Image (cartoon, grey):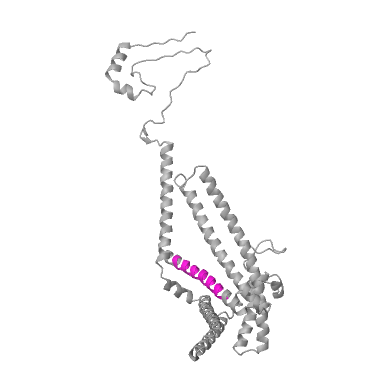
Amino acid sequence: MASVLNFPHADHHSAASSSSTHDLNDSYFSSSFEPPNASFQIQMNPLSSHPPRTPRTSVTSSSVKFGSEIYTSQEIADEAHIELNEDAETDDEDEKTREEAMNRIPKEVVWQDLLTTANGRDKAFKLMQYSLRMYLLFHSSAASLGNKARPGWEAALFKRFESTISGFSLTRKCLILFNWLAPLNHILADNSADPSDPLTPLTPTSSKPNSNKKPIRKHLLHTFLHTSPPVLLELVNGVSDDIATFSKLGLIGRKTGDRAGKFADWCWFVGTLVNLVENSVERGVILDLQHQVESRLYSESMTGATTKSNPSANRVDHKELERLQRQDYWIQVTRMKLLMDLIFVSYNVFRLKRAKSSIQTFTGLASAALSTAKLYDRHKTSIVKAAKFA
């Protein structure tokens, strides 16, 4: 069966097409290029494998149809890209504000906040103590190499410095008195279990926690036996240090104080080893997380994702990487401080005599500088956070 095509009003069609050439050009790719009065009838062969084609709405058509706005996918993507860029700019402004606040804080303000705590005063006195010891060490070495006799005023000055160093040592011991209260409170807090706490295991006789019941008291010996060894070690170390300090103050006999001091050195030695192991494990976790973030950033860069194409995810990854790198830096600082403490206390524990004064002076000053730097950064960060949320 042949297809039949009818084109009525042929003269009117040619006249309309010749009079409006720009309309024809505008609708060249449209399916309605014929005039409105023209009829175009198509009859296809039913046995044909090609069905009649229906006109499709152009994607690049007008954005307004019947009074409602129709957005293309490109416009939606552009709007989302603008919102992500605005979020990235907000994060940049917050980061710049934080950096400016960190740079604006005077050092005197940080030191004032640091010295209000007992720990901060201990670090400041330790710096002064070992700085004086370092000065005396170098001066005595130079005097011994020069083979010159010391004048009377210089000997008196050195004697005064030695007395000052001894006073700083005793002051620092008094500042850390009763440090054993923190681990003791931790142990006593575990001695009672609140039945209303959802983390408390239920007894076989009760199926639901009852808030009216009194806390179940465990036996104190049971609590001490089930306490973690680092907490017990910190408790025993604090008590031994206090006994040695009271002996130097004259409240306890000298022999008891010496024994307590030796036992405290052993506790310090073992505790330092435990802290070094924990530090290594923590740094391993941080390095693993850092490697994951770096791998994710590398994969995004290889797939073509950049800060402009995906600003939110890229920004989060970069901030996370900076945070992990900062944590790793201070973990390494803590490890160096622990190594200095281990060398220092090893001379007391194993009774080493060779170059004891020199090595303990170097390691003591290095430990004081590293711990003070870490505490200084902590107080500075807390000041910035307090100023931000004020």
Q: Nearer the viewer, residue 248 or 55?
A: 248
Quarter of the figure with residue 31: top left
Q: Nearer the viewer, residue 182 or 69?
A: 182
Q: Nearer the viewer, residue 253 or 356?
A: 356
Whether 153 is drawn above or below 122: the answer is below
Give the x, y percent position of residue 125.
52, 79
* Residue reaching furthest to the bottom: 152
Quarter of the figure with residue 80: top left
Give the x, y percent position of residue 97.
40, 60
* Residue reaching furthest to the top: 1
Q: Is residue 71 left or right of residue 353?
A: left
Whether 47 is drawn above or below 179: the answer is above
Q: Nearer the viewer, residue 367 or 245?
A: 367
Give the x, y percent position of residue 141.
55, 81
Magenta stretch encompasses residue 326: no
Give the x, y percent position of residue 110.
45, 72
* Residue reaching furthest to the front: 147
Most frequent secondary structure within the magenta stretch? helix
Q: Quadrant of the C terminus?
A: bottom left
Magenta stretch encompasses residue 367: yes
Could one spot residue 193 in this view of the protein? no
Specify the segment rendered in magenta: 364-384
Q: Is residue 210 left or right of residue 319?
A: right
